[in-house]
Image (tube, helix red, strand yellow):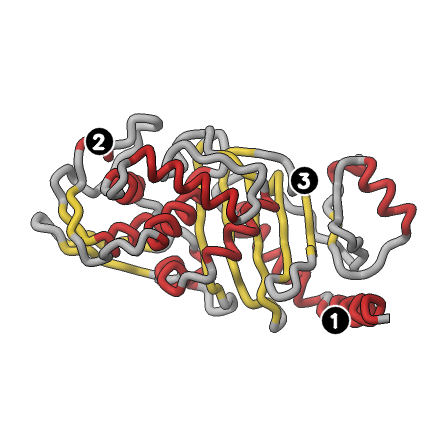
């Protein structure tokens, strides 16, 4: 296996020779290299796992490669809406302009359906409802173009230097980022209590004039009692593959997980479980390595 395709964990100190070889192959460790037993092999093409509390990278697989991000985009859409301090109870009408003309996906939200801004956020984040996300952008007081500009401005503010948005849904493959940048976006989105609550809701039903529409969270892990998830978002288009970002508590640590371009519908779930198992079984080594690092920094 070539070094460029090896996934390496961070926290335990590695030799300078190993660090140099890895950096020469295009993998960067942000000052900390790793060594743990049975590093998991992931089916996601790009991955990044970081301790949210101290910013240390645990695991990185081509984290600086730019790639389409599909509906992971909607986390940025939600932050822009909430940053504008718009009235969440305001009713917004789904219009013809909100129809997907990029991938021609279907939606249960009929043209003319009226929902509150908060309900649209709920459906966009929890169930990745594309018309809901589009309606949020089209109802932005300064206009749709200003909304997209605000998304890119927010990305710059978060130092997401390899990220660009062209639409609020993620259906356009030109919405691109890196696993490392998306970890920054997840960390920022976690600061919004409403985003945390919505993205971890298991089920939600909206009442329309025609019918009650039940929705489910697109991440099945939020219904798994073995996971303690604080934020979640999935995504898929053909160009991006299956994607998943999460904030979760693993082995008493707040962990951010980014998985992009996973092969197969359930591979991202398998990758997340492999990461969880690996962190839990290496907790003593991680704790010892962190203590050594803190001691070295303080010496």
Quarter in which the N terminus is drawn: top right
Which residue has dot 3 on it? 62
Which residue has dot 1 on it? 287
Q: Going from the N terminus, do you reach mark 1 or mark 2 first?
A: 2
Direction from residue 292 to residue 180 in the image, left or right: left
Direction from residue 180 to residue 155 in the image, left or right: left
Q: Going from the N terminus, do you reach mark 1 or mark 3 first?
A: 3
**Is disc 2 surrounded by few (<14), some (14 to 19) or many (20+) residues within 10 Å?**
few
Above or below: residue 202 compared with residue 105: below
Above or below: residue 108 compared with residue 237: below
**Is disc 1 surrounded by few (<14), some (14 to 19) or many (20+) residues within 10 Å?**
few
Residue drawn at point x = 44 percent, y = 35 percent: 165
Which residue has dot 2 on it? 97
Q: Secondary structure at mark 2?
A: helix
Q: How far separated are the C-alphas under marks 2 and 3?
A: 37 Å
Image position, residue 123 (x, y; %): 29, 51
Q: Which mark is residue 47?
A: none
């Amino acid at each position: 296996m070539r070094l460029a395709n090896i996934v390496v964990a961070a926290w335990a100190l590695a030799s300078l020779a190993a660090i140099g070889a890895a950096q020469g192959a295009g993998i960067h460790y942000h000052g900390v290299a790793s060594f743990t037993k049975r590093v998991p092999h992931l089916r996601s093409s790009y991955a990044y796992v970081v301790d949210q509390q101290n910013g240390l990278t645990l695991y990185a697989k081509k984290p600086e490669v730019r790639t389409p991000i599909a509906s992971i985009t909607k986390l940025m859409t939600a932050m822009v809406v909430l940053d504008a301090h718009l009235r969440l109870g305001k009713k917004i009408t789904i219009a013809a302009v909100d129809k997907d003309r990029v991938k021609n996906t279907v939606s249960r939200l009929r043209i003319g359906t009226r929902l509150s801004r908060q309900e649209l956020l709920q459906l966009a984040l929890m169930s990745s409802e594309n018309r809901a996300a589009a309606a949020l952008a089209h109802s932005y007081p300064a206009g749709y173009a200003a909304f997209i500009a605000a998304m890119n401005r927010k990305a710059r503010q978060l130092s997401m230097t390899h990220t660009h948005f062209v639409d609020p849904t993620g259906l356009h493959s030109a919405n691109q980022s890196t696993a490392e940048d998306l970890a920054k976006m997840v960390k920022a989105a976690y600061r919004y209590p409403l985003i945390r609550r919505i993205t971890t809701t298991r089920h939600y039903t909206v009442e329309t004039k025609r019918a009650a529409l039940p929705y489910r969270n697109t991440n099945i892990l939020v219904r798994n009692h073995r996971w303690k998830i604080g934020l979640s978002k999935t995504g898929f288009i053909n160009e991006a593959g299956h994607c998943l970002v999460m904030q979760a508590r693993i082995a008493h640590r707040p962990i951010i997980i980014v998985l992009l371009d996973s092969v197969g519908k359930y591979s991202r779930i398998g990758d997340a479980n492999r990461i969880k198992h690996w962190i839990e079984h290496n907790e003593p080594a991680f704790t010892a390595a962190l203590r050594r690092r803190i001691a070295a920094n303080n010496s």
